[in-house]
Amino acid sequence: MRGAKAVIAALLCVSFDKTISIRASFIAGVTGAALLAGCASAQTVALTNATVIDGSGASMQRGVTIVVEGGRIRDMGASAQAPSGATVIDLTGKYVVPGIINGHGHVGPAPRDPQLRQYALYGVTTTTSMYYDQDDIQQFKAAQKAGDLRGARILTVMYRFMSEPFRPGSEAKTPEEARAKVDEIVAKGADMVKVWIDAQGGRYPKLTPEFTAAVMDQATKHNKIKMAHIVELEDAERIVDQGVNILAHNVRDKDIPDEFIATLKQKNVSVISTLAREEAMFTFGDGPNGPAFINEPLFQNALSPERLVALRTTKHAEQAVDPMRPTYQRMFETDKRNVKRLLDAGIRLGFGTDSGGEPNRFFLQGWFEHHQMELLRDAGLSPMQIIQTFSKNNSEMLGIDKDFGTLAQGKAADLLVLTKNPLDDITNMRSLEVVYLGGKRFE
């Protein structure tokens, strides 16, 4: 992201450990605050002459001033004025969009901080952790809430209900044990409750309908958002009938029938697209050394030179001869068709990637989010629709839209400053110059 170093300036209240880094010379940086506490409260900043895309779907606004105080947007608009004593930053020729909310990500294995930092460096201001978090997650989130942020905010499922042989995940065996486990993870700070229904080509048993029904019912009693990992239409139909709120992946074994789309709409179920994940199941085996994008600086900044070598050799060879490769390619194309059908039908389409997690997946945090935007474009979404998926749509389906997701007076000052117009080309999201999270800037 060219010219970023020239933008590094004041506004830093927190000094980050310089030993934690990714080679992200293309980004000036980000700071953040979960509920906008800490030193941001002592500072008023006015971002003037900005061109704003607020994430709501409304038309782009030019000549906007954004007044940030206490980590929130105190005022915003063409008529807004910089208060006396405010730090004024002129954004003439720059574009401002909401921070990226990743509705399906992974943070782990430990440590968390470098992963959340990498997300933030790429413009992800909030991410979900969709597998397993240690019991200290409550304390970690409380520290974020108090302003101790070293990267993106985190929302967690705490624990993912799975079938054998996965551990953790398969300790509960009966519906009664499932209910008790829901009670336990809610007490430990779970923001959402997730079940994982996937036989992975017949290799593993699926969670039974009785088990998933118990999880859904107990999560409902706790007023928690309910999510499900699904691949096949029949499993999606089952869990929707049982009251799930979010499908954490799209159906990709067959084209979604009109009847099921109508059911999704009737029950107000959201669907997260994770096309970047589906493509990554086969694309590293392309060509003689992998896909062309692995030569791009944006990609290479997200991993070490040693890991890049492993990707080009070991991972490439593994995927090139994987007998499942044609199946993964077919499922990816089906997923793309289903994404567009859902959008055209008015289903709330969320933005996710499945980034992070087990390192040998090479689901690179931060880069995957920018690549997901390209794949949504290829599926037929407009730049404005793509921006809405990672802002308005995700905030609504995750239940955080009161404070996050769109840029408006009173909401969190989570915003990205770009040097190019993303409505001209969604890849202009890569012209990221500065990321403000909770009104602060992170280096």
Image (cartoon, helix red, strand yellow):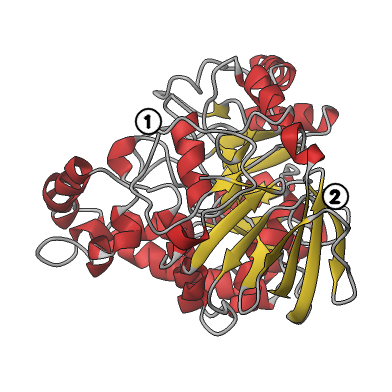
The residue located at (58%, 41%) in the rendering is: 152
Residue at numbered disc 1: 19
Q: Is residue 315 above or below residue 96?
A: above
Q: Is residue 340 above or below residue 261?
A: below
Residue situated furthest bottom in the rendering: 424
The residue located at (52%, 32%) in the rendering is: 131
x then y, percent, for residue 3: 43, 67
The residue located at (41%, 56%) in the rendering is: 367
x then y, percent, for residue 39: 73, 34
Residue situated furthest front in the rendering: 85
Q: How crowded is mark 2: few (under 14 residues within 10 Å), some or many (20 or more)?
A: few
Residue at numbered disc 2: 402
Q: What residue type is labelled 2?
A: Lys
Left or right: 289 with respect to 175?
Answer: left
Question: Could you tell me which quadrant the N terminus lies in?
Answer: bottom left
Q: In this view, does 84 lie above or below 35?
A: below
